[in-house]
Each structure stands twice: as C-alpha cells, then as structure tokens.
C-alpha cells in the first residue's frame, strides 16, 4: 500500500465518526497551545491529520537526500576552486571570504532542511534548500508526539504501526562525529548554540541544549555579541567553546558583522 492510500484510509476513518473526532481535535488544540510547539510566542497551526509515509518513501527520501548532498558538494567545491564561478553568486565580500576559509573538517553541508514537493521516487520538485540555521525540528517532534496520542491515531494504530522521526539526539551524535574529524584529541567538546537573541527559536535551542547534556556534553545558548576571542579560543565569559552549532542565518551574520568581530 502506498502513502496516498493510507492517507485516504485515515480520512475515511475520521469521516465515520466526525463528531467524536472533532471533540478530540478540540482537546488536541489545547494540548498544542500548552506545548513547546510555539513560534514567536504563538502555538503553531496544525491539522488533525499527520502526514503518513511508508518505509519505501523513507528510502526514497534517503536517495533524494544523497542526490541533493551530491549536488551541494559539487557546487561548493566548484565555488571554492573557481574564482570565475564565484562571480555568478554575487555574494558580499565578507561572505565569500568566510566560505573560502578551510573549516577543518570534510563536510560541506553538516546539516540541512531540503524542502520538496513529493509524489514518489521520480516525481518530486525542490522548493527550498535550507542549510542555514535550519529549524522546525522542535515543532515537528512535539506535534508528532501529540498527534500520536489522538483518538484517531490510536484507532488507526490498530491496523498500522507508526513512528515519528527523532531529530535531536541524532544531530548531537552527528555533530560530535563531525567535530572529531576536526579534533580527535578532545572527547568532550564544550558546545555553544549560537544565534542573535532577537532572531533565535528559543524553545528549539533549549531542546538541543538538553539533548547535548543528556548525551554527556556541556552546552550553552549564546548570543554571538556576548562572545570573546582570546588566547586562541572563543569564550562566553569563562566558558571555552570548542564546537559551535551555528543557528545564525548567514545574511543576518553579514548584516551584523560589525557587532560580532570576535565571533567572526
């Protein structure tokens, strides 16, 4: 069975008893209001209808992801190697200089959110490639946990088994793995999640901070304007930062560059 059929089956299930499910929907709205699924102080909008994917779809996503990463690597490598190619992007001078710095590890795109319109393995289109301060992991996980507890999903789970995508501890493991490629001598790097206070998604940062901590790493949330570069290292007060999980959107970093010379 494909995911479209499963989605239709779910809709038909809800239609069989609309009043009962509507009452449950209203309870779900209240749960979301009182949850961590917030953006700029407001609960995020949602449907009483999770998006269902099959194991085959997940394999397709992995293949599509590999394809996107392959393209990103080719473009990045060409950008670094070819001055004429760089001109096509018309990036500000500082941004170009930062891109050309050797970061010390071998991954061009450590994390990303690649948005697509999806209709199957060979039927998809890109609508956004977001490798820059990628967000919405907190909202996704929180909503998924709440929706799995709805009456409709409990009833639907009598026939199918459902799981959500874990998006926090997996990134902790991956980011630490990348860091070890940069510095294998430090088994317990101090982590800082860095963004401008007025721009950051605080709830999500707190979730990532907790994820690093439960995996055994020190972690702080810091505004780049509060960081100091001294003795060859980056510090928040007396806290020496080894690994930065940068959530600053690049264009905002460039716009506010004069405010963050130590971070740069």
Image (spheres, helix red, strand yellow):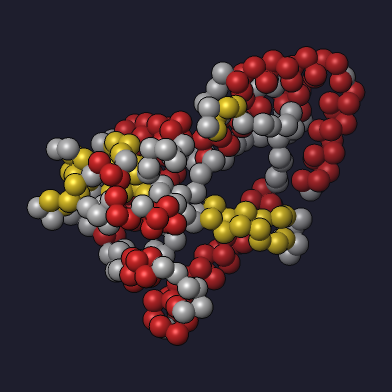
Could you tell me which residue is drawn at 80 percent across and 19 percent down?
21
Could you tell me which residue is drawn at 80 percent across and 39 percent down?
7
Residue 57 screen position, x and y as percent:
69, 52
- Which of these two is toward me, 249 or 203? 249
* Vertical placement of residue 242 versus 7, above or below: below
* Vertical placement of residue 51 versus 102, above or below: above
> Residue pushed farthest right?
16
Identify the image quadrant of the C terminus.
bottom left
**Image position of 114 (left or right of 85):** right
The number of numbered badges drawn on the structure is 0
- Which of these two is toward me, 48 or 96? 96
* Vertical placement of residue 75 versus 126, above or below: below
Q: Quadrant of residue 108?
A: bottom left
Is any atom of residue 186 visible in this view?
no
Is any atom of residue 58 visible in this view?
yes
**Image position of 13 (left or right of 219):** right
- Which of these two is toward me, 226 or 73? 226
Residue 83 screen position, x and y as percent:
40, 83
* Vertical placement of residue 222 versus 152, above or below: below
């Amino acid at each position: 069975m494909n995911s479209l059929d499963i989605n239709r089956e779910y809709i038909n299930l809800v239609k069989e008893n609309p009043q009962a499910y509507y009452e449950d929907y209203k309870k779900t709205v209240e749960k979301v209001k009182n949850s961590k699924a917030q953006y700029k102080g407001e609960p995020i909008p949602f449907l009483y209808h999770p998006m269902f994917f099959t194991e085959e779809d997940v394999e397709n996503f992995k293949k599509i992801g590999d394809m996107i990463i392959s393209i990103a690597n080719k473009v990045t490598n060409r950008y670094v190697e070819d001055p004429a190619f760089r001109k096509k992007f018309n990036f500000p001078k500082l941004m170009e200089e930062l891109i050309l710095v050797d970061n010390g590890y071998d991954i061009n795109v450590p994390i990303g959110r690649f948005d697509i319109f999806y209709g199957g393995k060979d039927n998809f289109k890109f609508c956004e490639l977001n490798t820059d301060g990628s967000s919405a992991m907190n909202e996704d996980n929180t909503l998924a946990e709440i929706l799995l507890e709805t009456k409709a999903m409990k009833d639907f789970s009598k026939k199918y088994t459902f799981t959500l995508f874990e998006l926090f501890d997996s990134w902790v493991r991956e980011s630490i793995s990348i860091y070890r490629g940069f510095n294998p001598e430090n088994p317990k790097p101090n982590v800082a999640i860095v963004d401008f206070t007025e721009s950051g998604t605080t709830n999500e940062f707190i979730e990532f901070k907790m994820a690093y901590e439960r995996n055994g790493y020190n972690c702080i949330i810091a505004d780049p304007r509060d960081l100091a570069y001294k003795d060859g290292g980056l510090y928040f007060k007396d806290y020496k930062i080894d690994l930065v999980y940068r959530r600053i959107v690049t264009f905002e970093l460039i716009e506010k560059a004069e405010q963050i010379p130590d971070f740069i």
